[in-house]
Amino acid sequence: MILDNYGYSSNNSGMNQGAENNLYPDSSKQEQHQTKGMFLVGMLTGIVISVLVAGSVYAGVKVADILHLRGSKQTSAEGASAQNVVNDDSITKLESIEKVIDEYYYNEEDINTDNMIEGMYAGMVDSLGDPYSVYYTQEEWEELMRDTEGVYYGIGAYVSIDSRTGYGKISGVIENTPAQEAGLRENDIIYMVDGEPAQGLELSEIVAMIKGEEGTIVHLTIYREGEEDYLEMDVVRKQIESPTVKYEMKDNGIGYIQITEFDEVTYDQFVEALSVIKGNEAKGLILDLRSNPGGSLSVVVDIARQILPEGLIVYTEDRSGKRTEYSCDGDNELKIPLVVLVNGNSASASEILAGAVKDYGKGTLVGTKTFGKGIVQRILPLTDGTALKLTVSAYYTPKGNNIHNIGIEPDIECEFDADAYYDKGVDNQLERAVEEVKRIMAK
């Protein structure tokens, strides 16, 4: 699954709270290539700072003493050792930090050696400054694998990170789930979860706060544009079986297929949907990729092979310039007019499909510019049951475009009218797509 958009299982995507949107280059589970009294406050703050500075001098002496006692173990950090994170210097400093915490940390009950160790591992990956590279504990890794199978315990919403605020954002809501029943909407900003601020956290941390035991309640404090105050919502967690494909026949012989994410189950669901649409002798097709955060690279490639002509679908390049190509034989090329719906939450794998459709002129893109995630993550399980998700390559559309931090512009710009949708049930973007399919069919 492409854990993306912030992708997961950000499912970036109805909110799978976990669909981080990372592109797994391989569908295998073991190696998936997936924000009165001020003077007094200021004065008091100054006093506190003075006390802390004085205290830090003593602690600094103690650290120096410890380092001095261990001086015989230290190296000059020159040569090869300076290039490695794990060396005599770093081991000595870690021992020193642990000793100082053991001696001075106020809330002794908070000291947990296992958490410290896991924190070190996570910190090493965090130091890369890449929001898509993550260290997973054994529990997190097992939960992630359950998510990619399309079943999890949560609220039925996709979550991503809002780049403007650093908060979590609802990037989609699955129908008939607690999230929809509670009134959550796409683009709602998650200000707090159970009273805890949600700014500056990793996507996986926000998702973990929202998920929980079936039947329990998670309290969300939501910022929604246009509202005068925060919205407070209690949402009951339940088992979510996330359908990734929806389809129906609309008037005038127009088929409609929506893909909410590219999970292991998605290909079979899509093939079934397309078969039904073709069996109804559809004269045109609307493919809805709005708010699809991504998923498995292999799955999106297989789906593209049911639509595209013969040729390149996408290719990746790693840091060494090694190129891997994914192609289509054209045997199943779609022969009816196609319109693809996209928006700012369409990311990663959904951009691969939309980008290929646009490059080949195989269909018309309607909506707003896509998210812009043009890199691929690979999950590398470790022998102790933990795992690393690392960015390993960039991907390019058939014409050689890398859309990372750029996105894909639609052929027809159409902003979503939220008021019309939530107040009247009118999806103006879908209506525009229907108009475009009709226009092409009439030629």
Image: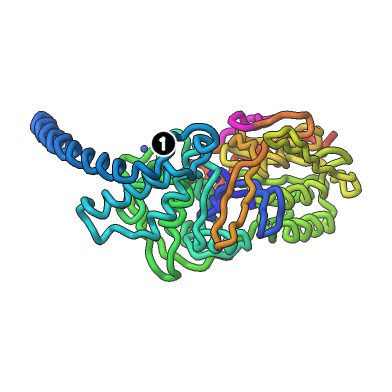
Range drawn in magenta: 404-415
Q: Is residue 91 left or right of residue 400?
A: left
Could you tell me which residue is drawn at 44 percent across and 55 percent down?
A: 118
Image vertical order of residue 117 relative to residue 54, above or below? below
Q: Is residue 367 left or right of residue 36?
A: right
Q: Is residue 227 left or right of residue 382?
A: left
Q: Nearer the viewer, residue 16 or 388?
A: 388
Q: How many marks?
A: 1
Res. 11 visible in picture:
no
Image vertical order of residue 280 relative to residue 125, above or below? below
Could you tell me which residue is drawn at 78 percent across and 46 percent down?
A: 304
Res. 140 visible in picture:
yes
Q: Quadrant of the C terminus?
A: top right
Could you tell me which residue is drawn at 35 percent across and 50 percent down?
A: 95
Q: What is the x, y in percent for residue 56?
A: 20, 38
Residue type, mark 1 in image:
Thr
Could you tell me which residue is drawn at 59 percent across and 40 percent down?
A: 428
Q: What is the x, y in percent for residue 67?
A: 31, 42
Q: What is the x, y in percent for residue 346?
A: 61, 41
Tell me, yes or no, whether the highlighted magenta stretch contains residue 409: yes
Q: Nearer the viewer, residue 104 or 165?
A: 104
How many residues crowd mark 1 within 10 Å: few (<14), some (14–19), many (20+)?
few
Q: Which residue is mark 1?
A: 165
Tell me, yes or no, whether the highlighted magenta stretch contains residue 189: no
Q: Nearer the viewer, residue 244 or 42?
A: 42
Q: Main secondary structure of the magenta part?
A: loop
Which secondary structure lies at badge 1? loop
Q: Is residue 202 left or right of residue 256?
A: left
